[in-house]
Image (cartoon, helix red, strand yellow):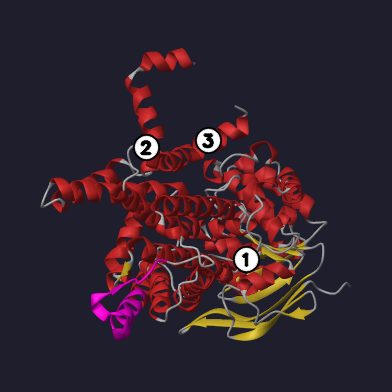
């Protein structure tokens, strides 16, 4: 078994008396899609926040690529190769699609304390950005203002930004939220292609998508991982059925 | 015209035309001492307004204490004058450096806040600078200080000529505008703009906005110091009024009236306010009663500011004459 890319050990977080993350331990291997499912309020997004560095856990450690990153802030973890998408799309609305992605390329290519040369004409940045846009199928809208893109296109753009960071791990917080059936189809295709290149930690409500994509699934209930296993193991697990899935979802 | 040139002109044309008009003004009826000193004041305030616009429009940092940097630049000139030093190669770098250091120290604290808190804390620092200068009794205290002599350059009194001074101000104003515009289009500027629109996104790709904002804040402060040093020379008199928070508000208004979206707007805004103030105050005793409503109307009907006015007018014109639109199509 290869060394895990991401390793959570005993992660806990309380908001006052409310326990949102309780002793969570899990791993993501290189090239694996590890999905986290759970009912609303199970603490999935809070967990993503702690892994990406926007929230500090009360207890436990987060190791990323062999390094303890528990104390590192959000932007430092991003530079190490931990890219995240947001549940509510987060892009720079006034930038073009290309510029949104080029910003991510710029972050990992040399100093940004350069004051005179027009960045819009930096070929190396633009070419890599264009390649990332092509990967998610947004090449044709590269020069459109991000605010003018459709909802699905914005989700794709956010993926392109994450890819352009040249990350080792993608943290995707409900990448399919609000996408129509066609867009969902396209996004699933994109995620499937990405799997070989990165480790992916996927939080998603769409069960069909999760079962189609995931190598392993962890079920989170009240901040606690009740079970981790393969798709078939999760489908058949009695506790999961009662806690979350219900009989219909498995039909 | 080639396409990129046309695009540049459409974006910056109004500011360019304004600068050209300022270059021509002394030869077309504005060459007397009064007109030249009025224009010099407009250009110097324009310089400070452009640097403020870099913060407001570029980085999203609404400072209500920018006049303090100008005041510090002016007081540096005065302090050297009192000590008998008037060599420009000493005075000007010192004025710029003093304002930059002030911006570095106050910015390092202010930039830890955002939004309304940032406005209030920059205002508070500005007031501290104001009361500090008021207490310099050797430099006139509240009464201000009349400059003994304008700054010399290597012993030559070139700034005494109003025409030379006019073109010096114009050249520096153009330099600040071009430099600021390049800055906003650079790698550095892109990080600033991204952090203004969506700081979370900037962090997510690995940029901590703080150091970029601080550098921008110091740069704007340095330009404010330069403007202050020039202003001391233009008026040959410096008082704490230069640092008052109403002066900061006026600079902010120049930026907004001109148009926050483009640095050139600040030049137009400064010119418009200085000239309007001058004209109205000669025509009317209670000129502020007219000035105020004019400003309110401008904000209501020109949300993109003066730089956005031509586009807005064109759109209105097209709307009014559908025939012309069909001819275009």
Farthest residue, direction front: B156
Give the image location of residue A168, x and y in percent.
77, 64
Residue B9, label in figure: 3
- The answer to whether dots 1 and 3 both sit on one chain is yes
Q: Quarter of the image for the N terminus of chain A: give it.
A: bottom right
Callout 3: 10 Å neighbours few (<14), some, many (20+)? some
Q: Quadrant of residue A242?
A: bottom right
Report how far apart the C-alphas of labels 1 and 2 lie in the structure: 35 Å
In reply to whether residue B131 is colored magenta, the answer given is: yes
Residue occupying the point 44% across, 14% down: B326
Q: Which residue is mark 2?
A: B309
Q: Which residues are magenta?
A: B126-150
Where does label 1 land, which residue? B207
Q: Are marks 3 and 2 in contact (CB under 8 Å)?
A: no
Q: Disc 1 on helix, strand or loop?
A: loop
Q: Nearer the viewer, residue B306 or A193?
A: B306
- Residue A199 showing in the rendered view: yes
Q: Do dots 3 and 2 share one subunit?
A: yes
Badge 2 element: helix
| Crowding near the residue tagged with mark 1, few <14, some 14–19, many ≥20 C-alpha atoms within 10 Å | many
Magenta-colored segment: predominant secondary structure? helix
Residue A69: x %, y % from top left: 70, 79
């Amino acid at each position: 078994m290869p060394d895990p890319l991401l390793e959570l050990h005993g992660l806990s977080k309380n908001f006052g008396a409310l326990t949102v993350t309780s002793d969570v331990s899990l791993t993501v291997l290189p090239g694996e899609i590890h999905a986290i499912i759970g009912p609303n309020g199970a603490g999935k997004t809070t967990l993503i926040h702690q892994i990406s560095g926007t929230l500090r856990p009360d207890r436990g450690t987060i190791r990323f690529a062999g390094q303890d990153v528990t104390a590192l802030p959000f932007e430092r973890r991003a530079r190490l190769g931990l890219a995240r998408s947001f549940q509510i799309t987060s892009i720079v609305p006034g930038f073009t699609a290309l510029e949104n992605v080029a910003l991510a390329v710029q972050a990992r290519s040399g100093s940004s304390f350069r004051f005179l040369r027009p960045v819009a004409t930096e070929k190396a940045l633009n070419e890599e950005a264009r390649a990332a846009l092509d990967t998610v199928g947004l090449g044709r809208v590269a020069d459109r203002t991000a605010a003018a893109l459709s909802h699905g296109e914005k989700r794709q753009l956010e993926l392109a930004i994450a890819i352009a960071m040249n990350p080792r791990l993608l943290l995707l917080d409900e990448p399919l939220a609000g996408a129509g059936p066609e867009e969902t189809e396209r996004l699933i295709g994109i995620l499937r292609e990405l799997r070989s290149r990165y480790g992916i930690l996927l939080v998603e409500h769409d069960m069909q998508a999760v079962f189609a994509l995931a190598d392993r699934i962890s079920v989170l209930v009240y901040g606690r991982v009740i079970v981790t296993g393969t798709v078939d193991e999760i489908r058949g697990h009695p506790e999961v059925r009662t806690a979350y899935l219900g009989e219909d979802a498995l039909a | 015209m080639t396409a990129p040139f046309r695009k540049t002109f459409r974006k910056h044309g109004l500011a360019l035309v304004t600068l050209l008009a300022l270059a021509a003004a002394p030869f077309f009826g504005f060459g007397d001492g009064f007109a030249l000193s009025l224009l010099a004041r407009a250009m110097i305030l324009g310089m400070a307004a452009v640097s403020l616009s870099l913060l407001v429009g570029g980085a999203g940092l609404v400072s209500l204490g920018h006049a303090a940097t100008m005041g510090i630049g002016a007081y540096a000139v005065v302090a050297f004058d009192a000590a008998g030093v008037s060599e420009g190669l000493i005075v000007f770098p010192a004025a710029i450096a003093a304002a930059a250091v002030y911006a570095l120290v106050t910015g390092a604290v202010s930039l830890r806040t955002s939004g309304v808190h940032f406005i209030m804390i920059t205002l508070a620092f500005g007031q501290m600078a104001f009361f500090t200068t008021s207490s310099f009794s050797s430099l006139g205290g509240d009464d201000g200080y009349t400059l003994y002599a304008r700054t010399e350059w290597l012993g030559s009194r070139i700034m005494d000529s109003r025409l030379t001074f006019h073109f010096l101000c114009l050249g520096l104003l153009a330099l600040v505008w071009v430099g600021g515009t390049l800055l906003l289009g650079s790698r550095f500027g892109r990080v600033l703009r991204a952090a203004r629109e969506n700081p979370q996104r900037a962090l997510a790709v690995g940029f901590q906005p703080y150091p970029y904002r601080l550098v921008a804040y110091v740069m704007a402060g340095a330009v404010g110091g330069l403007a202050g040093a020039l202003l001391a020379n233009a008026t040959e008199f410096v008082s704490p009024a230069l640092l008052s928070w109403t002066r900061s508000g006026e600079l902010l208004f120049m930026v907004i009236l001109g148009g926050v979206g483009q640095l050139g707007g600040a030049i137009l805004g400064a010119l418009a306010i200085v000239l309007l103030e001058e004209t109205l105050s000669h025509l009317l005793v209670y000129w502020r009663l007219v000035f105020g409503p004019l400003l309110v109307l401008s904000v209501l009907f020109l949300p993109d500011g003066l730089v956005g006015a031509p586009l807005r007018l064109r759109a209105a014109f097209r709307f009014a004459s559908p025939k012309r639109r069909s001819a275009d199509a």
